[in-house]
Image (cartoon, rainbow, N blue to C red):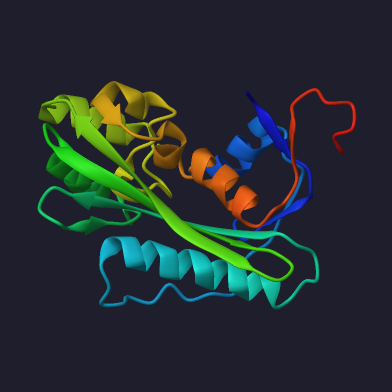
Amino acid sequence: MTLLLVDRLQLASTSPQRRAILTQLGVPFSTHVPAYDEAPLELAPAELVERHASGKAAAVARTIAERPVLGVDTMVVTSSGAVLGKPTSAADARAMITTLAGARHRVLSGLALVGATETFVGHAVTEVVFRALDAPTIDAYVARGEWKGRAGGYAIQGAGATLVERIDGCYSNVVGLPVALLVDAYRALHLPLVPAGDPSASA
């Protein structure tokens, strides 16, 4: 069942991917740029994405009164444990995709939802397996420019889907917002959820 999250969500992000997912869900939201420095920390990947998500949400929550406030942080971790962030150049993106080609990697998203009196913090993990890719295929994909602003250098919701052999876990997590975990967060904070199409739902 598709659900609408009734209260207007304050999104501590300007990510086009996250905005698109919330719009598709029918979630009313406002966006905010979090004044948060994602400094490198010596933490395990799951702890790190939770810490960054919490930091983003808390930074926005300190500046506005409206609740709930959502912070999300996503990273890609290779089978060897290397963390891949957002490429800084086409050459960087090419190197990342070459590393991921023919191998399994994990996409982790930390999620923090700040309510009126409580905060939910958790993370989602999706296993992704890339096809074996030759250099011309990688070069052609990089030339499309989808790598810009994308952890790991690819967009599964775009042409990056052709690089993927299979996934195990939440698809929307790979896009940038784990919807199932967001619903869990709303339920944990006892925030209202109504079925889509319910005439009592607020727009």
Taking the spot 71% from the left edge, 59% from the top edge, the residue there is 68
Identify the image quadrant of residue 41: bottom left
Residue found at x 13% / y 48%: 79
For residue 61, say whether it is visible.
yes
Tell me which residue sits at (75%, 46%) in the image.
192
The residue under the point 36% across, 42% down is 147
Residue 180 vertical placement versus 48 (above, below): above
Residue 158 position in % (x across, y down): 43, 27
Image quarter in which the N terminus is found: top right
State left or right for residue 170 relative to residue 104: right
Front in this rendered view, residue 188 or 32: 188
Image coordinates of residue 88 in percent, x first then y, are 33, 57
93, above or below 45, in the image: above
Whether residue 174 sits left or right of residue 200 in the image: it is: left
User: In this view of the protein, which residue sits in the foreground, 180 or 62?
Assistant: 180
Residue 197 % position (x, y): 80, 22
For residue 19, above or below residue 9: above
**Picture mark count:** 0
Placement of 78 over or under 54, stated as above or below: above
119 vs 122, left or right, is right
Instruction: Identify which residue, 53 or 2, lies in the foreground.
Output: 2
x then y, percent, for residue 103: 12, 36
Q: Can residue 34 be seen at all in this image of the molecule?
A: no
Q: Quadrant of the C terminus?
A: top right
Task: Identify the residue at the far right of this view.
Answer: 200
